[in-house]
Image (cartoon, helix red, strand yellow):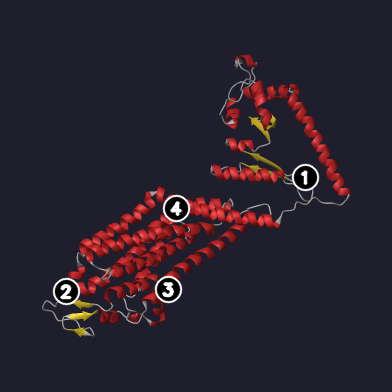
């Protein structure tokens, strides 16, 4: 069977182009199980690299419709040397052979000495003379004719005896090779993702700057908040600040989407070239998000605690608050990753992510209490991961706490369990409808939420790969 390809390497990077040519080389060497013949692959190609050039068997060079060369690639240097254009050392052969056509084929010949012939005509005549006198070329033609005759005779015998040539593969060996390729792809993708993270400071530096800068501004605006005793500072400012930290930190995970969208075109090309399965790319990105989220949660927790006194009363509470922020940021990154997979382009991805996070921040239990929501959408309170993070931080901050309050001449708002000028934190939790929840259960829900979102992404990528197989040709099977 003959396979004709017109510039198959156009638009590919050097690595993908080389892999494609290596595959075509292997395909050309395989025997057809029905005819017993090898495949013939005929391609047009421009400016192949040196490594790709070494994979080519036979070459046809045309210039303005004239045949300049036809034959084995290994014999081209002999022809060009006979025309006064030998291949220089450390030079790409394909570039040299094409560039030589801009000059006359014999050293010392000029346009005036060419009897009105063009360069292309002189190159074509030089090739005809060279192949008629060159012994190696004549021997090659005889050997090729002998091989063709032998193959025709072999095929004829196989047809007379009703036998077919069948290529058999070792299933166990193929399974081991596939397993090895899967492991190598997973490890290599993780290594590449971590390398990009640390070699490209903008990816991590932008988010560190945003989270760190906002935390410092919060610290300056609410300096020593826990030392204040005004009702508004004790009740409103503390709860609002916990809400804002979670809402802002989660919503700003969209800052990672542009970098993922930039890589998506490259990843899709590599997937179509069968470099790896898209699921492994998602897993590598999920692993990269772990240290990023940890760094961001540490920055936010340390700055906010140091400047405002919020996030608990002792080091154990600060550690617990950091873990909660870490899990919330992981959930936010998992959501952004899924949106990045699904959205068709960057603008729509950012708009979708912003809309989803906006809805989550409205129903997480601060702006409106669950009991105040309409019955038919009350279930939305349990959907956002921010709900569980907010409940845990509120529990850490206010459970079993006594909050001193000064009234400044105004009547103290009525809250149950009021004791003089002190307010029990449990009463505040009860007013937010958070007194009956177990923080450990909420932590488990956060972990499950994160894994479920990654699972949804993996299912989508499996479906996307299946759909792509129906559209794009991956192999000759």
Mark 4 vs mark 2: give the one in front.
Answer: 4
Give whichever of discs 4 and 2 has the lower sequence position. Answer: 4
Please tell me how crowded label 4 is: few (under 14), some (14-19), or many (20+) other residues with Cα within 10 Å. some
Which residue is disc 3 drawn over? 445
Q: Is residue 128 toward the left or the right of residue 429 in the image? A: right
Element on which disc 2 rests:
loop
Q: Contact (CB < 8 A) between labels 3 and 4? A: no
The residue closer to the viewer here, 19 or 296, is: 296
- Can residue 84 be seen here? The reply is yes
C-alpha distance separating marks 3 and 4: 28 Å
| Residue found at the far left of this picture | 409
C-alpha distance separating marks 2 and 1: 90 Å
Residue 411 point in image, percent of width and height: 14, 81
Quadrant assignment, res 37: top right
Which residue is disc 1 drawn over? 37
Element on which disc 4 rests:
helix
| Picture quarter with the C terminus | bottom right
Give whichever of discs 3 and 4 has the lower sequence position. Answer: 4
Which residue is disc 2 drawn over? 230
Mark 3 vs mark 2: give the one in front.
Answer: 3
Please tell me how crowded label 2 is: few (under 14), some (14-19), or many (20+) other residues with Cα within 10 Å. some
Mark 2 vs mark 1: give the one in front.
Answer: 2
Give whichever of discs 4 and 1 has the lower sequence position. Answer: 1
**x 51%, y 56%: residue:** 281
Mark number displayed over residue 194: 4
């Amino acid at each position: 069977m003959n396979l004709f390809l017109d510039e198959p390497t156009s638009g590919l990077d050097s690595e993908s182009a080389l892999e494609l040519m290596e595959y075509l080389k292997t395909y050309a060497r395989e025997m057809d199980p029905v005819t017993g013949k090898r495949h013939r692959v005929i391609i047009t190609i421009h400016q192949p690299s040196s490594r790709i050039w070494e994979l080519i068997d036979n070459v046809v060079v045309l210039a303005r419709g004239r045949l300049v060369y036809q034959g084995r690639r290994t014999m081209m240097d002999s022809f060009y040397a006979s025309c006064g254009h030998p291949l220089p050392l450390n030079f790409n052969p394909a570039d040299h052979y094409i560039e030589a056509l801009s000059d006359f084929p014999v050293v010392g010949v000029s346009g005036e000495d060419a009897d009105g012939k063009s360069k292309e005509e002189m190159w074509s005549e030089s090739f005809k003379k060279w192949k008629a006198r060159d012994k190696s070329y004549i021997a090659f033609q005889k050997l090729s004719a002998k091989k063709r005759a032998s193959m025709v005779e072999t095929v004829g015998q196989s047809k007379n005896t009703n036998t077919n040539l069948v290529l058999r593969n070792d299933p166990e060996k193929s399974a081991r090779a596939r397993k090895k390729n899967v492991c190598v792809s997973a490890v290599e993708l993780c290594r590449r993702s971590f390398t990009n993270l640390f070699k490209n400071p903008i990816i991590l530096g932008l988010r560190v700057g945003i989270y760190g800068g906002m935390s410092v501004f919060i610290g300056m605006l609410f300096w020593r908040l826990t030392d204040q005793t005004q009702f508004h500072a004790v009740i409103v400012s503390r709860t609002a600040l916990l809400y804002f930290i979670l809402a802002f930190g989660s919503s700003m995970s969209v800052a990672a989407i542009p970098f993922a969208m930039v890589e998506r075109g490259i990843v899709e090309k590599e997937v179509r070239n069968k470099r790896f399965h898209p699921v492994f790319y998602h897993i590598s990105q999920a692993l990269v998000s772990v240290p990023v989220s940890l760094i961001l949660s540490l920055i936010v927790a340390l700055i906010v605690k140091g400047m405002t006194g919020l996030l608990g009363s002792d080091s154990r509470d600060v550690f617990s608050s950091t873990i909660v922020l870490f899990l919330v940021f992981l959930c936010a990154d998992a959501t952004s990753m899924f949106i990045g997979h699904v959205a068709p382009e960057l603008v729509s991805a950012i708009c979708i992510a912003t809309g989803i996070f906006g809805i989550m921040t409205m129903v997480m239990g601060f702006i409106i209490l669950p009991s105040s929501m309409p019955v038919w959408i009350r279930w939305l309170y349990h959907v956002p991961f921010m709900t569980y993070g907010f409940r845990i931080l509120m529990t850490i901050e206010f459970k079993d706490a006594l909050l001193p309050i000064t009234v400044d001449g105004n009547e103290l708002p009525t809250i149950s369990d009021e004791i003089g000028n002190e307010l029990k934190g449990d009463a505040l939790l009860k007013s937010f409808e958070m007194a009956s929840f177990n923080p450990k259960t909420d932590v488990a829900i956060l972990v499950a939420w994160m894994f479920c979102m990654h699972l949804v992404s993996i299912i989508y990528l499996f479906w996307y790969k299946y759909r792509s197989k129906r559209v794009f040709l991956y192999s000759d099977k």
